[in-house]
Image (spheres, helix red, strand yellow):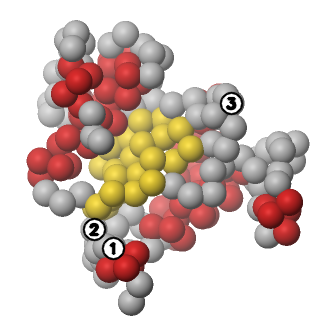
Amino acid sequence: MTEYRRHRVQGGTYFFTVNLADRSQTLLTDHIEVLRQSLRTVKQKHPFTIEAIVVLPEHLHVIWTLPHGDDDFSLRWRQIKSAFSRHFEIGEKISNSRMRKHERGIWQRRFWEHRIKDDNDFARHVDYIHFNPVKHGHVAVVADWPYSSFHQFVNQGILPMDWGGVAGLESDLELE
């Protein structure tokens, strides 16, 4: 078993960061319904639970829990990226190595993942996800960003609507 596979946990909960190849684009929010449909389509064939998510113009952060006995998040990301990319005509810059592998150039090839270790780790990552639009200057308060599970957390009574509206909170939400 490779070192990489030893860090996976079947049925585990993971935090992901996934980026567009061209970070100056705004495809993810401009085409939010395409992204949502891509997620739904893959979830039907390869179930997972979205615990928290935020979609920004050029990247997204999400926490997934995989089903018991399943650790193949890479398959899911490959299919989500592919489903999203199929909605766009080819026009992006594609490197020679991507052309040889018949890949599009919309997404960065890789993604960053972190296995959630405990409740505290989960809470820190959820906070990071929800505060991310403020961190990147898209909005002044968390509640103003529409592409976030924050609103579900408010509706469920988990967070107050004014959460994340306090100056200086960002320093408490750094993960690295």
In the rendered view, does 20 fall on the left or right side of 106? left
- For marks 1 and 3, the one nearer the N-term is 1
Crowding near the residue tagged with mark 2, few <14, some 14–19, many ≥20 C-alpha atoms within 10 Å: some
Residue where numbered disc 1 is placed: 8
Based on the displayed image, in which of its 4 quarters is residue 13 positioned?
bottom left
Q: Amino acid at mark 1?
A: Arg
**Residue 39 pos. (x, y %):** 53, 53
- Quadrant of the image for the C terminus? top left
Residue where numbered disc 2 is placed: 12
Q: Residue at x 27, y 34 (%)?
A: 174
- Quadrant of the image for the N terminus? bottom left
Pick the residue in front: 132 or 4: 4
Q: Amino acid at mark 2?
A: Gly
Crowding near the residue tagged with mark 1, few <14, some 14–19, many ≥20 C-alpha atoms within 10 Å: some
Q: Which mark is residue 49?
A: none
- For marks 3 and 2, the one nearer the N-term is 2
Extreme residue toward the bottom, this view: 1
Residue where numbered disc 3 is placed: 25
Secondary structure beneath dot 1 equals: loop
Work out whether 144 lies above or below 99.
above
In the rendered view, does 124 fall on the left or right side of 151? left
Q: CA distance from mark 3 to mark 2?
A: 32 Å
Q: Is residue 101 visible?
A: yes
User: How many badges with numbers are in the image?
Assistant: 3
**Residue 83 pos. (x, y %):** 67, 56
